[in-house]
Amino acid sequence: MNEKNQEDLLDRQLREAAPYIEDGGFTARVLGQLPAPRRRGQSLRPVILVGMSLLASALAYVLSDGGRFVVVGMVRLTVLPSVWIFLFALGTGILVMAGGLLAAMSKTSQLQS
């Protein structure tokens, strides 16, 4: 029996084994006196994250001489032999495929357990 099914079985057995003890309405009175749950407002976390990302992107653009490194990289790629570009693309594709295969195998092993 795998671990998840065993936990479900134990949880169900514990719930069935513990009968409700009549308390004369005590639980209902205590729950009625508890304050209502507060609704939290929206967090500023996403706004801060997007703002800092934009700031970092702008700073990187300015410090990199206006993105000149992208143009230089493209020029370097155009002078490479076609065989090297093909081998680089093939190797990258194999790595991505292997990563996807590992992720799929990991997911199926999690679903089986």
Image: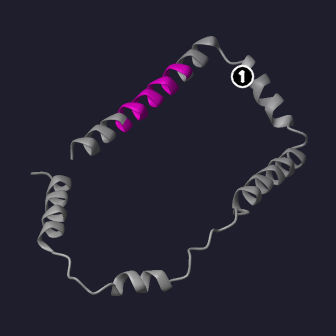
Q: Name the residue carrying label 1.
A: 77
> Magenta stretch mostly in which secondary structure?
helix
Q: Quadrant of residue 27?
A: bottom left
Q: Is residue 8 left or right of residue 61?
A: left
Seen at 52% across and 27% down, the residue is 92
Along the viewing direction, whichever of 109 and 102 lies nearer the viewer: 109
Q: Pick out the residue farthest to the left.
A: 1
Q: Which residues are magenta?
A: 89-103
Q: How many marks?
A: 1
Seen at 28% across and 87% down, the residue is 24
In the rendered image, residue 109 lying in the magenta stretch gets the answer no
In the rendered image, residue 97 lying in the magenta stretch gets the answer yes
Q: Residues within 10 Å of mark 1 (few under 14, many from 20)?
A: few
Seen at 9% across and 51% down, the residue is 1
Tell me residue 99's x, y (percent).
42, 35
- In the image, residue 63 above or below residue 102: below
Tell me residue 96's x, y (percent).
47, 30
Q: Pick out the residue farthest to the top.
A: 82
Seen at 78% across and 57% down, the residue is 52
**Which amino acid lies under the numbered mark 1 shown in the image of this protein?**
Leu
Along the viewing direction, whichever of 25 and 57 lies nearer the viewer: 25
Identify the element where label 1 is drawn. helix
Q: Is residue 52 left or right of residue 8?
A: right
Tell me residue 60's x, y (percent).
82, 48
- In the image, residue 4 above or below residue 85: below
Q: Is residue 31 left or right of residue 1?
A: right
Q: How is the image coloured?
A: one colour
- In the image, residue 12 above or below residue 90: below
Q: Is residue 78 left or right of residue 11?
A: right
Along the viewing direction, whichever of 65 and 58 lies nearer the viewer: 58
